[in-house]
């Protein structure tokens, strides 16, 4: 049986219904042979997927958001976890791969996560999301300047990007500051988090949209990765 204590402080305020939803997510991760993750053991998944996702609830912009998007949602983290934790919010799980989208939909239905929706699209082509999100989330998606370019057009003015990162990389962070200036973003903080015991080198990079993103963004699919902003 899955309990809030398994999540430490992150699980302290979860209801029995929310805990049951997390248990259902973990069940499908373990049993579905098409789950797009190497971490399927329940005890590992609680830490590496769920607790790591819920660490972002420390960020006020996420805790108070109404409309959020998880780019490159993959197996559903952080998006599914945040949707369960924030039942009053709407979360879009943006994923371009058909099989991953099918898995996300199975999990969503199995766990009864009614406030999450699966969007099959590349981030650069998700026109319905332009300027429409309070928060954009990304976890292990791409180099940070690429993530910034994906996220900026999808954020409303004043909206927030939260980018899950591991070990800090100075050159990439410098390139990200240059990219942010072009895209109308400003870095607010880099917060070190310890979502579970023994977790190391985990950081949440937080950016806010403080200006208009130029109309030339998003560039056509693939260009952000091929020619990332900020690198000389």
Image (cartoon, grey):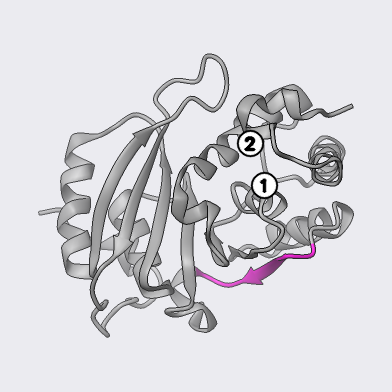
Q: Is residue 200 above or below residue 112?
A: above
- Whether the residues at callouts 1 and 2 have beta carbons within 8 Å, the answer is yes
Decide: few, some or many residues near mark 1? Use Cα within 10 Å; few <14, some 14-19, many ≥20.
many
Taking the magenta stretch, the answer to whether it contains residue 66 is no
What is the secondary structure assignment of the residue under circle 2?
Answer: helix
The count of marks equals: 2
Q: Quadrant of the C terminus?
A: bottom left
User: Would residue 224 be found to the left or right of residue 23 on screen?
Assistant: left
Question: Which range is magenta?
Answer: 114-122
Q: Nearer the viewer, residue 133 or 101?
A: 133
According to the picture, the residue beneath numbered tag 2 turns out to be 49
Residue 56 sits above or below residue 126 on the image: above
Q: Is residue 41 visible?
A: no
Give the crowd class for mark 2: few <14, some 14-19, many >=20 residues within 10 Å.
many
Q: Earlier in the sequence, mark 1 or mark 2?
A: 2
Q: Is residue 148 left or right of residue 62?
A: left
Give SS at disc 1: helix
Label disc, if present, on residue 150 of the rendered structure: none
> Residue 147's spot in the image, x, y percent?
37, 57
Residue receiving disc 1: 81
Q: Write down the quadrant of residue 52 in the picture.
A: top right
User: Does residue 117 belong to the magenta stretch?
Assistant: yes
Location of residue 39 with respect to 184 vertically, above or below: above
Q: Looking at the picture, how far across and down is residue 187, in whole percent?
A: 25, 52
In percent of width and height, residue 216 lies at 26, 82
């Amino acid at each position: 049986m899955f309990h809030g204590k398994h999540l430490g402080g992150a699980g302290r305020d979860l209801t029995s219904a929310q805990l049951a939803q997390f248990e259902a997510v973990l069940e499908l991760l373990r049993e579905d042979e098409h789950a797009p993750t190497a971490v399927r053991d329940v005890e590992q998944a609680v830490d590496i997927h769920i607790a790591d996702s819920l660490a972002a609830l420390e960020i006020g912009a996420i805790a108070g958001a109404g409309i959020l998007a998880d780019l490159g949602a993959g197996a559903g983290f952080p998006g599914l976890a945040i949707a369960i934790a924030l039942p009053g919010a709407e979360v879009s799980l943006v994923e371009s791969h058909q099989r991953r989208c099918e898995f996300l939909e199975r999990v969503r239905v199995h766990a009864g996560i009614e406030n999450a929706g699966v969007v099959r699209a590349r981030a650069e082509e998700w026109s319905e999301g332009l300027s429409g999100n309070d928060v954009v989330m990304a976890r292990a998606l791409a180099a940070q300047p690429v993530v910034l370019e994906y996220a900026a057009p999808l954020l409303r003015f004043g909206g927030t990007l939260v980018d899950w990162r591991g070990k800090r990389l100075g050159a990439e962070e410098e390139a990200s500051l240059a990219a942010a200036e072009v895209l109308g973003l400003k870095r607010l903080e880099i917060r070190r988090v310890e979502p579970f015991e023994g977790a190391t080198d985990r950081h949440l990079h937080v950016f806010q949209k403080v200006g208009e993103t130029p109309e030339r963004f998003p560039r056509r699919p693939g260009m952000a990765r091929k020619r990332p902003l900020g690198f000389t």
